[in-house]
Image: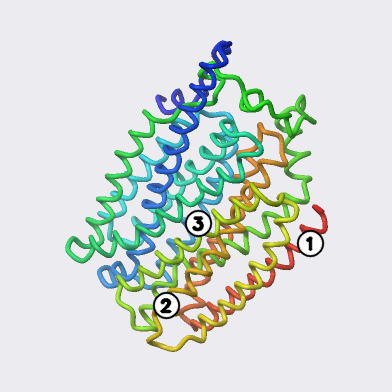
Amino acid sequence: MIIIKLLKPESNKKTISNSEYIKKTYKYWRIRIFYSLFVGYIFFYFTRKSFTFSIPLIIDDLHISIKDLGIISTLFYITYGLSRFLSGIISDKSNPRYFMSIGLILTGIFNICFSISSSFLSLSIFWTLNAFFQGWGWPSITKQITYWYSYKERGLIWSICSISNNIGGAIIPILISFFSKSLGWRISISIIGFICIVVGLILINRLRDTPKTLGLPSIEKYKKEKLTKQKNENLTIKKTLINELIKNKVIWLLSVITLFNCIIKTAINDWITLYLINQKGYDLLSAGISIFWFETGGSIGMLAIGFINYKIIKNTKMIIIMTFYFILLVILSIILWCVPVGYNIIEYTLIGFMGFLIFGPQVLIVLMPINIVNKKIACTANGFIGCWSYIGAAITGYPLGLIINYSWNMYFILIITCSLLASIIVIILYNINK
C-alpha cells in the first residue's frame, strides 16, 4: 500500500561538514517544523472536539440521549488511548512527516462521514474511526521535538507546542456555535473536516523526517550536548521496553497521575457547557465561551510551568509543585460548585483558573518520559502514558453520563476526588524521584 511506503522512515544522508551551512539549515528547519507541528495540532483538535460542542444540537436534532452520547464519547477515548500507545510504537519507526499528515487528513474525512450520519450505530463507527487516526498526531510531535530539540530546550518547546491543543480547544466551540446558528451542526462539522484535509496536505509539504535524513548531525552533536541517556544503547527494543518502561516505577506513577488529571480535564472540557446550559441557564454561545477561558487558562499554565522549568528549577523540584496545583483545584472546584445562578463572570474566571491548574502539570507529565528513557522509545513511553490518560477520559464518557443523569452534584464530587488522589500520588512520585 502507498500509505505503508510513505510511513517508512527516510534514509540518512551523508553528514554535511560545513558548519555555517549546518547552522543555517538547522535554524531554518527547526523554525519550519515547529510552526508546522503547532498549527497542525490545532486542527487535530478541531476534528476531535467538533462532536463535543455539537452535543446540545445533536440531542435536539436526532433525539439521542445523554447516555448514548456518553457511549460514543467513551468509545472515542478508549480507541484514542489504545491508538496513542500503538501509534507511539509505530511512530518510533516511522516518518513523522507523513504519519502526522495522513492522520489529520483521515480525521477530516471521518468528520465529514460523521456529519452525514443519523443512526447511533453509524455515528459510533465514524467517531471511533476518527479516534484511531487522532492518535497519529501527538506521537509525531513527540518524535520531532525529541530529534530536533536538545534536552535543555525540550521543556520550553514542549510547553509552547502544547498550547496548540488549547488554542484549538478554545476556538472550536466558538466556531461550532457560530456556524451552527445559520448552517446547522452537520454543515459545521463538514466544513471543519474539509479544512483539516487541506491542512493535512499542507503539512506534507512543510514537515520533514529527522535531521540526519537531511544530512545534518544529531541535535546532541549540533548543540554539543552530552547524551543524557547512554546506558542500554546496545539493548534490543524489546529489552529496552522491559527495562525502561515496564519496570520503571516513575513511568507507572506518571501514568496514574495522568489518569486522574485527564478525568478532571475531560470532565470539564466535555460536560461543563451542558452543565451551564442545563443548570445555570446559559445559551450555547455563552456556554462555549467558558471553554475558551478554560483553554486560555490552560495555555498560560503550560507556558508558565515550561518557562519556570527551563529557567529556574528542574523537573525533580517541579514535581512537588503539582501537589499544590491539585490541592488548589479542589478548592476552586468547590467554589464553582457553590456559585449561584447569574454570576457568569465569576464562573468564567474560576473555569479559567482551573484550566491553568490542570494543563500546567500536564506538561511535566508528558515531558518527563522522553527525558528519562532511551531516545529510541521516547514515542512509545509517551504513548504508554497517553493511553492511561485516555482511559481516564473514557470514564468521563458513558460512566460520567450516567452519573450526570443521576445528579450534577456527583459530577463535582468526581472532580474533587480525582484532584485529591492525584496530589497523593504526586507526593509518592516526589519521594521516589528526589
271 or 79: nearer the viewer: 271
Residue sitting at x 69%, y 54%: 254
Where residue 262 sits, quadrant-wise, is: bottom right
Label 1 to label 3, Cα distance in Å? Answer: 27 Å
- Pointer 2 residue: 275
Mark positioned earlier in the residue sequence (1 or 3): 3
- With respect to residue 109, does 362 lie above or below? below
Q: Which mark is residue 428?
A: 1
The spot of residue 77 in percent (x, y) is 50, 56
Q: Secondary structure at mark 1?
A: helix
Quarter containing the N terminus: top left
Label 3 vs label 2, nearer the camera: 2
Three-letter residue code for mark 2: Tyr
Extreme left residue here?
182
Q: Is residue 61 left or right of residue 347?
A: left
Disc 1 crowd, CA 10 A, few/some/many (<14, 14-19, 20+) = few
Mark positioned earlier in the residue sequence (3 or 2): 3
Label 1 to label 2, Cα distance in Å? Answer: 34 Å
The spot of residue 215 in percent (x, y) is 54, 16
Label 3 to label 2, Cα distance in Å? Answer: 21 Å
Three-letter residue code for mark 3: Tyr
Disc 2 crowd, CA 10 A, few/some/many (<14, 14-19, 20+) = some
Answer whether labels 1 and 3 touch (C-beta < 8 Å). Answer: no
- With respect to residue 376, does 357 lie above or below? below
